[in-house]
C-alpha cells in the first residue's frame, strides 16, 4: 500500500496488494490524482470498501466513498449541490477528522458557526442551514450503513436557529399576488422583455428553472401549447430533467400569452444564427435564474404592491386556479406538475377558504 508520483505526467497514483475473503491475493492500482493527498484519500476509501467491516475512516475518505457509490443513484444537480456544501462547509472543519471522533457537541458548534458566518455579509437562510445539517447527517448515516460508524451524532442535535429572529413566512400563504395586485405591478413594467417574462410566469405557473430551460421548440403556438421538458439547475450549471416525473407536462396557453409570445418570436428570430433551439427567455445561451430575480427586485421598486419572490408568480397562479371551485384539483395539479397531495399541502390556506365557502353555501339550504 503506497502512493507515488508519476514523473512523466506529474500526477499521483496509488498501488498495493490485498487478499479477498477467499484468501486470494490481488494487485490494485489507480492513476490520475492531482495531489498526494487525493491519492491517499482515494486509496483509503478503496481499501475500506474492500474491507467492508468496522474500520476508522476520515471525513475526506467517507465523502469520496459516498460519491463513488451515489453518483448513479442521485441526480447530477443534487450531487453538485452536495459537493459545494462539502467543499465550503464540511471539509474545512472535518476533512481530516476520523468520523468516530465527531461528537454531537461538534455538530452543534459547527452548524451554529456556519449559520452565523453567513453569505456576503448577511446570514444564511434557515433553509440553507438545514441543508448543511441534513447533508452532514446523511453522510454519517451512510457511514453507519457501511459499518464504519456505530451511531450518528447528528441524531442528538438540531439545525441552528437564531433565537432573536422573527419568523418570516416564505410560503404560499403570503408569497402570492391576487390578480389586481399583479395587474397593478405589470402596468409599471416598461421593459417589454421583462413584461413578457412576468406574464409567462403568472399565466403558466412555471418554476423559474423551467422558464430558463424553455426553448422555442418547446412551444406550439398554433395549438397554444407549451411543453415542459427540462429545468435549469444552478448547481450543475446545465439543463437537467424536471424536478419530478409529474413535472414533465404540457400546458395550455391563454390567447393573451400566445399573442405576446408570437410577437417575441418575431423579434428574436432576427438574431444572427437564430433557430428553434434558442432559449425563449435567453438566446443561444441560458439566462440564469439570478438575473431574473435581480430584474424583478428592481422592477418591484417602481410598484406600490406587496413584495413577493419570483417563485411567488407560481403560487399566485395556483392560488387563482384553486379559488375557482369549478376547476378540479387534479387539473390544477397536472398544470403545475404537482401531485395532488403536494398541492393540498402547499395550498392548504386556499382549501380552508373553500371549506368556509362550502359551509356558507349549506347554510342557505
Image (cartoon, rainbow, N blue to C red):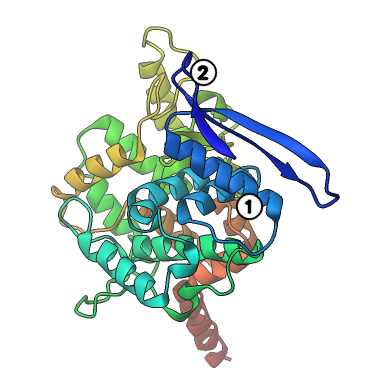
Residue neighbourhood size for the residue with mark 2, other residues' Cα within 10 Å, grouped as few (<14), some (14–19), many (≥20): some
Task: Give the residue number, with chain letter if any, for mark 2.
Answer: 276
For numbered disc 1, what is the local secondary structure?
A: helix
Disc 1 designates what residue? Answer: 48
Identity of the residue drawn at 64% across and 31% down: 29
N-term-proximal mark, 1 vs 2:
1
Q: Nearer the viewer, residue 105 or 320?
A: 105
Front in this rendered view, residue 350 or 283: 283
Residue at the image position 47 percent from the left and 23 percent from the top:
11
SS label for mark 2: loop
Q: Residue furthest right?
A: 22
Percent across and percent down for residue 240 are: 54, 37
Q: CB under 8 Å between callouts 1 and 2?
A: no
- Residue at image position (36%, 60%) is 128
Judge left or right: residue 189 versus residue 225.
Answer: left
Please provide percent x and percent y for residue 202: 40, 48
Q: For residue 243, say whether it is visible.
A: no
Relative image position of residue 210 (x, y in whole percent) = 48, 40
Amino acid at each position: 500500500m503506497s502512493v507515488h508520483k508519476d514523473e512523466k505526467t506529474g500526477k499521483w497514483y496509488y498501488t498495493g496488494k490485498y487478499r479477498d475473503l477467499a484468501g486470494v491475493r490481488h494487485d490494485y492500482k489507480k492513476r490520475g490524482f492531482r495531489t498526494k493527498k487525493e491519492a491517499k484519500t482515494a486509496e483509503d476509501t478503496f481499501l475500506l470498501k474492500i474491507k467492508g467491516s468496522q474500520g476508522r475512516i476520515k471525513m475526506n475518505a467517507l465523502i469520496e466513498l459516498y460519491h463513488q457509490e451515489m453518483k448513479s443513484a442521485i441526480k447530477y444537480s443534487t450531487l453538485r449541490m452536495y459537493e459545494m456544501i462539502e467543499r465550503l462547509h464540511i471539509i474545512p472543519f472535518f476533512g481530516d477528522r476520523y468520523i468516530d471522533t465527531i461528537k454531537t457537541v461538534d455538530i452543534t458548534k459547527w452548524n451554529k458557526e456556519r449559520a452565523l458566518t453567513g453569505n456576503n455579509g448577511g446570514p444564511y437562510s434557515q433553509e440553507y442551514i438545514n441543508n448543511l445539517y441534513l447533508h452532514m447527517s446523511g453522510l454519517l448515516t451512510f457511514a453507519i450503513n457501511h459499518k464504519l460508524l456505530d451511531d450518528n451524532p447528528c441524531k442528538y442535535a438540531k439545525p441552528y436557529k437564531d433565537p432573536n429572529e422573527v419568523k418570516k413566512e416564505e410560503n404560499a400563504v403570503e408569497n402570492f399576488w391576487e390578480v389586481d395586485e399583479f395587474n397593478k405591478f405589470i402596468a409599471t413594467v416598461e421593459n417589454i422583455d421583462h413584461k413578457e417574462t412576468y406574464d409567462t410566469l403568472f399565466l403558466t405557473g412555471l418554476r423559474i428553472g423551467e422558464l430558463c430551460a424553455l426553448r422555442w421548440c418547446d412551444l406550439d403556438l398554433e395549438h397554444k401549447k407549451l411543453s415542459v421538458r427540462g429545468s435549469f439547475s444552478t448547481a450543475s450549471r446545465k439543463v437537467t430533467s424536471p424536478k419530478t416525473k409529474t413535472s414533465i407536462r404540457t400546458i395550455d396557453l391563454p390567447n393573451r400569452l400566445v399573442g405576446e409570445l408570437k410577437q417575441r418570436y418575431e423579434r428574436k428570430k432576427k438574431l444572427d444564427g437564430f433557430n428553434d433551439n434558442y432559449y425563449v427567455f435567453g438566446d443561444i445561451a441560458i439566462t440564469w435564474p439570478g438575473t431574473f430575480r435581480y430584474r424583478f427586485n428592481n422592477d418591484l421598486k417602481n410598484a406600490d404592491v406587496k413584495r413577493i419572490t419570483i417563485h411567488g408568480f407560481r403560487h399566485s397562479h395556483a392560488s387563482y386556479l384553486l379559488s375557482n371551485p369549478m376547476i378540479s384539483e387534479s387539473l390544477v395539479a397536472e398544470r403545475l406538475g404537482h401531485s395532488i397531495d403536494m398541492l393540498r399541502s402547499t395550498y392548504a390556506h386556499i382549501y380552508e377558504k373553500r371549506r368556509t365557502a362550502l359551509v356558507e353555501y349549506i347554510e342557505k339550504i
